[in-house]
Image (tube, rainbow, N blue to C red):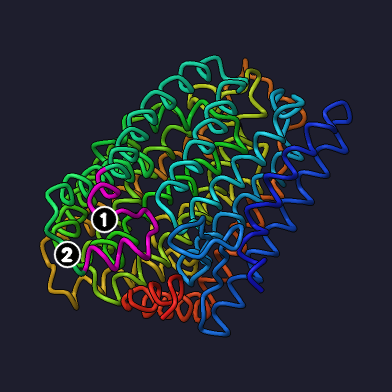
Amino acid sequence: MSALVVLPVVIPLTASAVAVLLRTHHRLQAAWAFGTMFTSFICSGALLWSVWSSGAPVVYQVGNWAAPFGITLVGDLLSALMAVMCQLVLTGGFLYALGCRDQCAQYPAFYPIFLMLAGSLTGAMLTGDLFNLFVFAELLVFSGAALTAISDDKFGTEAAYKYFYISFIASIALLLTCGSLYASYGTLNIADLARRIAADPSPPLLLPAMALLMVFFMVKGAVVPFHFWQPDFHTAAPTPVHAVLSSVVVKLGIYGFLRMTTLLFTEQAEVIRSILVVVGAVGVWFGGLGAVGTHDAKRMLAYSTLGQLGFILVGIGWGTPLALSAALVYAFNHSLLKAAMLMLAGSVASYAPVKTAAFTAITGLGKKLPLAGVLFMLGGMGLAGIPPLNGFVAKLMLFNSGLDAGAYVPLAVIGLAGIVTVVYIFRAFQRIWWAPLPADVKPKPHGDRLVAPAFLIALSLILGIWAEPLIALSQATVTWMTSPEQYVRAVLGG
């Protein structure tokens, strides 16, 4: 069963190399990429089921080098859940790419690089070693920047440069973290570090390492005030890539903060959580107001991500079992809905005479796309926390956790900011689907297909009506996370 934790990483990376060999046969290359991505998702689902049903994580020691000396891959409930979430949305992204009319999706390099992005993101979730987190994060940067640079959008190259150089700063922060922790404890294995830090939190480099690791995850998660690369980068990326970048790639930061507060730095967790509550509450308002004031549907949804991530960070900051469970459900729901909403924005833009999601270009285009309008409204309701979608369940759990924690001030702050979500979603819907189509605008007869966003929104609707499995899984994950000694024992033995 240990192979289950390897396959979701190896399959996309190996398939990427094979896809290069198929570069002269585009349809075969596209079918190969989607098929292997779907197979990888099935493997990650099998991993999650194995861990959840058995109650024991799946650990793989690469080359049979025992931890902490070798490379370790760990599929516990948290990493397996995050891997399933990422690969589910990635499969939707590949499905959208099959029906996408972007010119860049026809390039021979598109699918190989997209598969590399999928493998590196999954590897970052499943690695049990900080240095290998750096390796996977670098692969993620290279693939994301390359996919954005080849975008049809004229600002793609500029956005790719911004992302690359800002990520370079984050990489330096992670390398300094690795150096500081290795100098202090002689290991970079996460389980071994957790054991050693708990036993001796006195080394002078510990707090600088903790701060630098927070910087890394804040940049990766586009957390305010380290968000400045995100709106430009995500707006300029190709739609199938943008849908993945703004929904699950930013979840690397969320995953990192969960590990920091429940495993690596349990003695210092209260300080980290206090910071997360503040930056989360600020992010909710900043992202919401930025979405209201922007001029582009994709850019609006990119700013929306800042706000939605703020809700999740506040839940992690409260740190109670209910709050952590709410954060996990919220993260899963946001991944589905944000990917779907970005796909819908891209689909509408594909009908514009010049493909762009600027409101000036897509105003009134929705009158030709009634199904897209229904899906957009459902997705917007989910983001705003309106039933019956899973967004309502997530937000209700989060607000209840705030009441249980007695955090009335931050709860009021994020509760009022939630109204802003309704404002920008309905404003966008009104401009695209209610406003008249200008007489001089002639929409294209065909555009991007709606199969992928329909699938993701339907899944969120199902999880809203039948939320018990996801809630039970999140609660089991929190129970596991709050017992860090189980993770350490599973990786190191004893």
What residue is rendered at 28% in x and 46% in y? Answer: 213
**Residue 288 in view (yes/no):** no
> What's the amino acid at mark 2?
Asp
Determine if the magenta segment contains residue 187.
yes
Q: Main secondary structure of the magenta part?
A: helix
Answer left or right for 32 relative to 377: right
Task: Name the residue: 56% across, 85% down.
Answer: 54
Circle 2 sits in a helix, a strand or a loop, which is it? loop
In this picture, residue 122 sits left or right of residue 351: left
Query: Label 1: how many residues lie within 10 Å, few (<14), some (14-19) or many (20+)?
Result: some
Quadrant housing the N terminus: bottom right
At label 2, counting other C-alpha atoms closer than 10 Å, the crowd grade (few under 14, some 14-19, many 20 or more) is: few
Residue 401: image quadrant is bottom left
Query: Foreground residue, 484 or 285?
Result: 484
Label 1 belongs to which residue? 185
**Residue that appears at 45% across and 48% down:** 133
Q: Quadrant of residue 304?
A: top left
Is residue 24 placed above or below 308 in the rendered structure?
above
Q: Earlier in the sequence, mark 2 or mark 1?
A: 1
Q: Residue furthest bottom?
A: 54
Q: Is there a contact, CB below 8 Å, between mark 2 and mark 1?
A: yes
| Residue 408 in view here | yes
- Residue that carries the numbered disc 2 in the rendered image: 200
Q: CA distance from mark 2 to mark 1?
A: 9 Å
x and y percent of residue 361 in the render? Answer: 54, 22
The magenta-colored residue range is 180-198
**Taking 384 as reference, is 12 left or right?**
right
**Residue nearest the viewer, comparing 92 with 430:** 92
Q: Amino acid at mark 1?
A: Tyr
Residue 403 in percent (x, y) is at 18, 74
